[in-house]
Each structure stands twice: as structure tokens, then as C-alpha cells.
Image (cartoon, coloured by chain):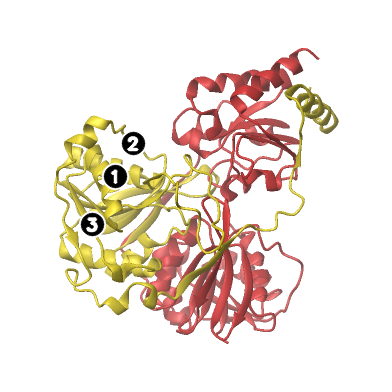
Chain colours: A red, B yellow
Amino acid sequence: MADVFAYIKHADGVADDSALELFVAAKKIAPDAPVTAVVTGTGADLDKICGEMAGVYNAVWKIDNAALAYPNAEVVRKALVNILPADSIVLLPHDTFGMDLGPGLSIKMDSAFVADIVGFDGMDGATLKVVRQEFSGQVSTHVSCDTATGAVLNIRPGIFQYDDSKAGGDVTDKSGDAGDLSAKRTFVEVVAAEAGDVDITKSEVLVSVGRGIEDEDNLEIAFDLAEAMGADVACSRPIVDAKWLEKSRQVGTSGQTVKPKVYLAMGISGSFQHLGGIKGNPFIVAVNKNAKAPIFQVADVGIEADILEFIPELTEAIENL
Amino acid sequence: MEILVCVKRVPDTSENEIEINSDGNDIERDDLVYSVNEWDNYAVEEAIQIVDKVGGSVTVVTVGDDESEEVLRREMAMGANNGLLLTDDAFEGSDGKGIATILKAAVEKGKYDLIMTGAQADEGAAQVGGMLAAMLDYPYASLVNMIEPAEGKMKVGREIEGGNQEINEIELPCVLSIQTGINEPRYVGIRGIRKVASVEIPELSASDLGLDAGAVGEGAAKVKRVDYFVPDMGDGAEMLEGSTEEIIAKLIDYLKAKGGLK
């Protein structure tokens, strides 16, 4: 069995949720195989994260270099290619960083790549069987992956919840092996999201609309319902892409993380990126005309209906209470 | 600027319910409506806007069969100057790396400053752009939602978590994967499609591309889909049934109980 590594994402001295989820995922591949955390960065923050990971992983490899102060995927890739054994199995989070790093890393390591893994279904020799989803979660697939020359596996965030399991090990400083870290892409800055007129992260009740609203003019019915309920209006990504609502109202990993008491998902199919922005276990009501929409798997209450007809009737009923 | 945009013909999820066939080895494809991958439209639009600003030309390329020609024509109707169809039985069953290998051969037959892909397509892997860049030894940026075109080195914005944007400088030639929302793709009318209906689209086979058939296709694929299945959904939502009045009455009871009404 090849060596298993997990890349630890962190910022400002805080490990990303994926840091420990990857440990859980790695143990699903091979329960007894040791898993090494690879932590890149520089200075005191790096040492702090390495210390935390040493309490969980079987071993920690640290790469301290000023060029890694911000995780530029091209620079991280160079460092990983230089330090990892050729046939390694490398786990990354399937987020905006893992998508940037994983595919190219697999080419440079001459290994297989599987994106957005949501489950593992056993290892037979060097053939790993994993579970993925296609068409925004409408169907699932088993995928076989030949790991004989190594593999880069991008793991969907939030699936392999950390369960307090731990192995524990030492930190090894691999900084001297990182090699040439010059890159043709350089990080400049992070531009913070603009604040909008409503802060949906503070809302207790959200009426959230998706593609099912069909037309910008139809947004009015969502605002009417929100007003009747004393709620705020949020939305999913396509509504922001179409420029119908401002980005500050978008719920999801690329938008806002909300923690309401009640969340009405109106005409939202429920992609994992959208669900990733809903925290605090709210009561979720889903209304969608597609009975197979993935949102019905996570909602508490579901209604199969066209929101363009359902929302005005619900608004009227609430106004008449 | 010479720009190559890689596009894909995919089942249109807004037009179809995706269902699994009786053998469980594919989705039901008989009555599917296909269209160009949504992300690719944004990439083509961005390429056209860049060329409008700084000059050059846009070529759209796809790996597929004869039917894939229609998505090339659609993108040419948007304003792409050239189309290129990479087609060969040997390409069947390629995994992401196989597709990137085929595209790399096409890139090397031309002279492009900028190569774009959609950030992801129907399989949700978001992999081909990054693989292609690494094979070419070009720098890569994924999930790009802003481009300031320039010679030699460009400024690009990447969408990252929390609605934030990561700004990078990237040397040309490079590969960028384009996120939705970067622009508003123009509408393509029937007249636009007609205009390009008779434009000849060159086809290149494995041998035209100098590809060893063993380097692509099912035989070379390390990653293979075994089957499709419907996952055990667990309990899922309690579906409210009955007349609309009954459903609304039940829903209002729930909303009151859970603090959803003020």
C-alpha cells in the first residue's frame, strides 16, 4: 500500500475544517495505513498548525518557506512534487484551493486524479473504488481508480465529519527538500466581498430563491413572502450570476454562510456548494417542481410544486392569519 | 491575442430530468436535450470580449463526435472565429487525463497565448484545465471571475470561499478555467446559427494530432466510471401532500412551531 498524505489547509493560524476531515477520509481507504499530514506555510502560525496536526495524524511533514506564506497552488504543487514519494496517495479538499492544485499535481506526479469524492467503497489490490456524484447530485456513480502509480484524491468538504479519532505522531521538518519554488503565477491580494444592504448572515428566517424563479421580474413574489413572514431574501448562485440580486445575498461556499432558524429553499436544487453555506442545523423547507431535486434529501419538509404558483398562495395565506 | 476555448457538449440539466437506464451503466440518453456546457459559454464570451478589446482571434475546440459540431457552431454564432473538432474512435472512454492529452496535442498544433476552459462540466470534476496546463508547463488559474487582458503578464481574479476574490498575476501563455458570472454571455438567435451553418469546421484525428492511440481512450484511462446508482437517500424530507390549501395549512403550522413567522 502506497503512503497516504493529506494536505492541510489553514489561514491566520486556524486549520480549515477539511484538515481533520481528510484524516477521517484517509482511514476509510485503509484503516491501518499511517497517514501523514503535510503542512506548508511559514513562521509561528505554521508551527501552531503542525502541533495541532501532530495530535491527530500519524506523522506531520512541515515545509517552512516564505514563498508558501499564502497557498499559491503552483508553488504548493512544486513543493509537494519535490517532497512526496512518487507513488503517494494524496488527499486534498475539493474546494477552490483543491480544484486549483489537484489536477495539475496529478500530472506532475504521473498519478491518477479523482475529483469531488463523497465516499469510499474499498481497495482491491491497487484499485480504489470511490463514490462520486454527477449532474449536480442528481445521480451517483462508482468510480474505479488505478492507484498503482499514485493518486490525487479531492475530497468533498463536509462529508467525512471529524470523529475525534487520532493516532498522533512527530513533526518532521522537510523545508530543505522543497526545492525551487519560483512560479509563473504570483499571488497579489485577496479582495474582500462587498457588504450588501442586508446582512443575511444575521437573519433568523430566510426565503432563498434559485433557478426556479425563472425571471428577474418574479423576484417580487419572494420579497412579498419575506415581508409577510418577517424574513429576508437570499438566493443561490445562478441568481447572482444573472445579476438579479447582489452577491451579498448569495448562500453557499462561494457566498455567505448563514445560520438561520428557518430556511425556505424555493426552486433551489441543492448543490453541495449551496448547502455548504447553511450552518446551525436550521429547519429547512424545500419547494421544487422536480421531485428528484437533491434538496429534498436534506430538507425537513418538502413540497413538490412550482414556486411561481406556490409562493403567492403561501403569502396570501400568511397575510390572512 | 490568440485564444483557444475548450468546450463540451453535455446534457442540459435545465431541460431534462437525469435518470439512470435499466442496466445502471449509463443515464437514459434517448430523449436528452444537449447543449453546450454552461461554464463554457462564459469562457467563450470572455474570449470574444478580450479580442474585441485587444485584437486577435478566438478558436473553439471540442473532443467529441459529429454531434459535437453543433456546440462549436453555436459558439461560433456567438462570435468565435474558428472551430476545431477533435474526433476519433480511439478517443472513446478517455478519462480527464486522456481528454487533456488530446487537447494538448491540438494546442501544440497552433500558437495560442491564452487557453480557456469552463470551470467544470457535467461530471463536476473541474479537472481538464489544470491537467492541460501542467502538461504544457503553462501556469494555471481556476475559477477565474475577472481578467485584465495584457501582454506578457495578466491580472486575473479567482473566486474563493466566502465571496472573496483572490488576485493573481499570471504569465502568458497560460490556461484559465472560467467561473460563471464573470460576464453575461450574449444571446444566440436562430439567425446567428444560420450564418455559420455552412462554415467548414476542420476535423483532426489521433493520427492528425500525432497521438499514439494507446495514450488516450479507455485503455489509457486510470479512472473509470463503473456504474450509476441512486444513493440511499435516508429519510429525506417529509413530503407534504394534499390540496394546495392543506399543504399550506400544514406548512404554516410548521413555520409557527419553528419560529419561521413573526
Amino acid at pointer 3: Leu
**Is B55 or B57 nearer to us in this picture?**
B57
Graded by Cα atoms within 10 Å as few (under 14), some (14 to 19) or many (20 or more), the crowding at tag 2 reads many
The residue drawn where x is 84% and y is 27% is B253
- For the question of whether residue A136 can be seen, the reply is yes
Mark 1 / mark 2, whichever is N-terminal: 1
Element under label 2?
loop
Vertical order, B9 against A26 (above or below): above
The residue drawn where x is 65% and y is 36% is A201
Q: What number is the disc on residue B44?
A: 1
x and y percent of residue A183 in the render?
Answer: 33, 66
**Chain holding disc 1:** B
Q: Are the residues tagged 1 and 2 within 8 Å (C-beta)?
A: yes
Taking B176 as reference, is B49 left or right? left
Amino acid at pointer 1: Val
Would you name the residue on which mark 3 appears?
B85
x and y percent of residue B60 in the render?
Answer: 24, 51
Graded by Cα atoms within 10 Å as few (under 14), some (14 to 19) or many (20 or more), the crowding at tag 3 reads many
Mark 2 / mark 3, whichever is N-terminal: 3
